[in-house]
Image (tube, helix red, strand yellow):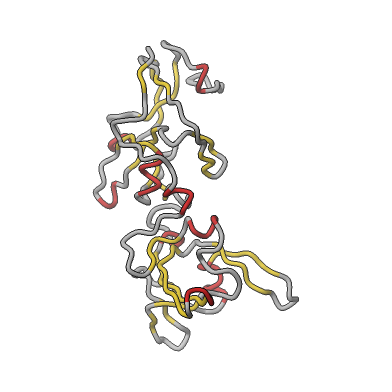
Amino acid sequence: MADGTEKPIEQIELGDLVMAFDPSAEAGRGGMVPKRVTRLFTNEAMQIIDLRGLRCTPGHFFLSGDASSGEEARFRPIASILKQDGTLVEADGSVVRARTGSRINSRDDIEIRVVFYRSHDNGESTVTVRAGIPVTVSAPSQSEQAMSLLQWLDRNGVELRDDGRLQAQDGSVFDCVDWPQGQSPLDRVESQNWVTQRENEELYTPPWIANLPDIEDEVGLRLVS
């Protein structure tokens, strides 16, 4: 609320003074300003999305858009944003990847090609992932250790370049890297969110996102007052 207090969204009423994005600043990415509630909408759904602790319906509208890539900021249903591997504008105006929470243009958001092996895939498979993808590797003590692929590369002296290519300590450059031992990038939901492309696919969509209802940008909200 504008006075610093909090109120469940379902209890918001017409005339309440809330904090909202300033539409005149940086296409909606500017600071938060007090605004009066002038309309109320309701959204009925059978599914709830848990997005890193934020629970919402597939049709809930979020501000999305990345000015650095020329993308116009606008409010869209979260299901549509996730299916297109889109972005979210946070309260402080920063832009993050909706599926992963990584900052746009950060090192965690750089795409890398990785090679892994699974018996039911008849050998070698290649996928494109973002560098912040979680991996589990065996430590010298034989215990498992969780880290990101980027951290694993840094630990092994491999430099991740801005173009997604990898440079070894001897200066040689590679287009892809072997996936660390353990589960493949496709075995866990937490990892699937960081996968962007499989072989012969334009865009990889994790099953839990693919199964969300199709909600167009113009549909999903019903004006109640």
26 in relation to 122, above or below: above
Q: Nearer the viewer, residue 166 or 188?
A: 188
Q: Position of residue 13 (x, y in %)?
A: 46, 13
Q: What residue is shown at x 29% (from left), y 51% (from top)?
A: 68
Please state which of residues 177 and 16 is positioned toward the viewer in this rendering.
177
Taking 124 as reference, is 58 above or below it?
above
The quarter of the picture where residue 105 lies is bottom left
Query: Can you give x and y, in whole percent of width and height, for residue 50 in the image?
Result: 54, 41
* Position in image of residue 173 (x %, y %): 38, 83
Residue farthest to the right, as pictured: 141
Q: Position of residue 5 (x, y in %)?
A: 56, 21
- Tell me the residue at 45%/20% (across/down): 18
Q: Residue furthest bottom?
A: 170
Number of residue marks: 0
Report the quarter where the C terminus lies.
top left
Q: From what the image shows, is residue 2 above or below residue 196? A: above
The quarter holding residue 200 reads bottom left
At x 50%, y 36%, the residue is 47
**Residue placed at 46% from the left, 30% from the top?**
45
On the image, which quarter does residue 212 sit in?
top left
Image position of 109 (left or right of 180): left
